[in-house]
Image (cartoon, rainbow, N blue to C red):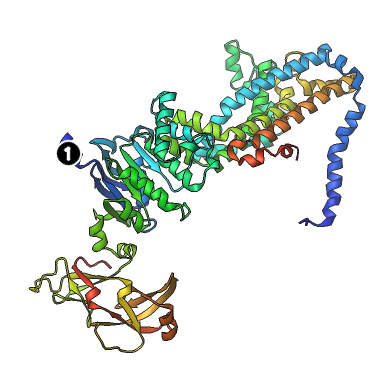
Amino acid sequence: MSSSRENYRENFLEISAQVSSRHADLNLSVARGQVVAVVGPNGAGKSTLLQLVAGSLRPTSGRVSMLGRELSSKSTHVPPHKRTVSYVEQRALLFPHLNVLDNVAFGPRSRGAGKRAARERALAELTATGLAEFASRKPDQLSGGQAQRASIARALAIDPDLLLFDEPFAALDVSVTPAVRSLLRGRLSGSDQTALIVTHELLDVVALADVIALVEDGRVVACGPVAELCANPPTRFMAEFVGVNLLHGVARGAGSIELEPGVELYGLALHGLEPDGAHIGAPARATFGPDAVSLHTSAVGGSPRNHLRATITHIEPRGAVVSVTLECAGQRLRAHVTPEAVAELDLLPGREVIAAIKASSVSLFAGPHKP
Amino acid sequence: MNHFPRWAWAPFAVGIAFLAVPIAAMFARVPWSQLPALLASDRSRDALRLSLVTCFSTTILVLVLGVPLALVIARSSLRWVRWMRTLVTVPMVLPPVVAGLALLVALGRRGLIGSHLSAWGIDIGFTTTAVVIAQTFVALPYLVVSLEGALRSAGARYEAVAANLGASPSRVFWHVTVPIAAPAIASGTALSFARALGEFGATLTFAGSLQGTTRTLPLEIYLLRESDSDLALALSVVLIAVAIIIVAISTKLSSRPSLRAPSIASDGGLTHV
């Protein structure tokens, strides 16, 4: 528990806090300079995590500390204005009575800078954000994208030790999201800036984050490098977030898992599945893309080794393809098929089909069974 | 297309006439040529001066007490504070005479608190201070209720943003809460001022009617209505003029550009709708 200087270089931010009213028990540690994508289902506790760090929420028990300094604990609670944490929300929330420059200068002014110094700092920040020409405008004269850029400039102008973003692009027009995202990427990468970003977009994670913290049911259920969690999604939510199917089962041989008695899925063994058979009977998982699944109404021969009986539960058009949700061995999987196939095979919810999955597209992992 | 039944025009006309005719009748009776001389008389100058002084004092008191009061009611999550919200509206529905009686029982010479103050040599009843207290008692709820509603609908989000940027609670209050609520504060203040200016029953009951000390414009008008109806009418004109000015200011302020698109504010015809 000692927090020596050496220690907090590694553990820049330490959260180990419970909020009983929200059934949250959140544990997370973040290193300096890390950009952490906080992902998870709605209501899982992502915003609670951010509020604990920002100081707008006090934990029922546990502690939050940053740079070795206790922010929240049983005995202390540093109020938001005394923390060096910036918070950017979905909506820009620029103060309507101040022009853009004074909005950005508000933070430095509140932290003791003189009027002129604060304005200079604000102008520098607006210039870096490409908004210098809008400095004297009122917020209601900005577009949504410009306003959100200004709010990012405002958050950066206080030199925060930590930046918090709560779905920063969710309220923006899709056409301007890429520009704002790349602005943020420019400001985060190559700097020592630590940040937490709550998002529902895989693109944000890949473009901005080093680490994913997966929050489900009020807990941080996994935290690791982006590539690792995307390649080997530990939960159904994460698998759907990445856009792959995740099936749970029990390891059989080196190249197959049993989904339920008599239903086997063949694939390529990856992490933790040894060829000597030592793992047989242990929980295992399989992932494969929705494109690797083809649907048939009668038994088929040919190369795919996996033919699973499945029931259609939901059909939804998605751009050029149709996403078909199936129930198979008590689990859910998704197939992307062409609209022609849907018409030709007369696919309807409730219909029984055979899902053929190319074994070469299925990755198998050793891992805990998650219902 | 009008989205109301045609017969609604009939009650509309009756209602407008009902409101406008008495005022028009009064304007017809006002001795306009003698107006300057009438208003320059001792009695009217005393009443005018007293009303002006007490209403401005009341307005300041209402602002100092009312803005923080409305803020606490709008932002606090404590249950008993929410009960206070109901309590604040009571003087609005209380008959003014009853309000004056309540003040007398509390602050009068033999009142609950007044008797102690009396022992210290402080007598409030039947002084100009009593006028200000009576006016504040009835006018304060008008600011609190209208401002509390505005603060509630504006939400605490801007305040949370300011806190995260490093602003202390007091700085948030002065630099975020007050400027954003400025139009609501202004129109609430105008309402309170108008209510204080027209205050009659509570003032008469609690402060009495002494010329130059507690006899404000409405009290003077009431006393003069039979003995010197010309002067009563002249003073009424003053009250009506002030009321019109207040309504105009309040309409103008509540459509200020700070919270709305500039195109609305630049539309000059709006204020007279």
Q: Specify the farthest residue to the left.
A: A276
List x then y, in percent, for residue B252.
68, 34
Q: Is residue A24 in sight in this rendering? A: no
Q: Nearer the viewer, residue B210 or B8?
A: B8
Query: Residue A161 lies in what quarter of the image?
Result: top left
| Count of labels in the image | 1
List x then y, in percent, for residue B147.
59, 36
Q: Nearer the viewer, residue B51 or B78?
A: B51
If the image is split into quadrants, where does the N terminus of chain B sit?
bottom right
Q: Amino acid at mark 1?
A: Asn
List x then y, in percent, for residue A242.
31, 63
Q: Is residue A150 above or below residue A105?
A: below
Q: Nearer the viewer, residue A346 or B116?
A: A346
Query: Residue B234 lies in what quarter of the image?
Result: top right
Q: Is residue B54 above or below residue A251?
A: above
- Dot 1 falls on a residue whose secondary structure is helix
User: Is residue B140 found left or right of A38 in the rendered image?
Assistant: right
Q: Which residue is mark 1?
A: A7
Q: Is residue B183 above or below residue B217?
A: below
List x then y, in percent, for residue A121.
39, 30
If the image is split into quadrants, where does the C terminus of chain B sit?
top right
Q: Nearer the viewer, residue A184 or A355?
A: A184
- Residue depicted at x 82% and y 22%: B235
User: Is residue A279 found left or right of A54 in the rendered image?
Assistant: left
Disc 1 packing (10 Å; few <14; some 14–19; many ≥20) = few
Disc 1: host chain: A
- Residue depicted at x 52% and y 43%: A142
Query: Residue B36 lies in what quarter of the image?
Result: top right
Q: Is residue B246 in sight in this rendering? A: yes
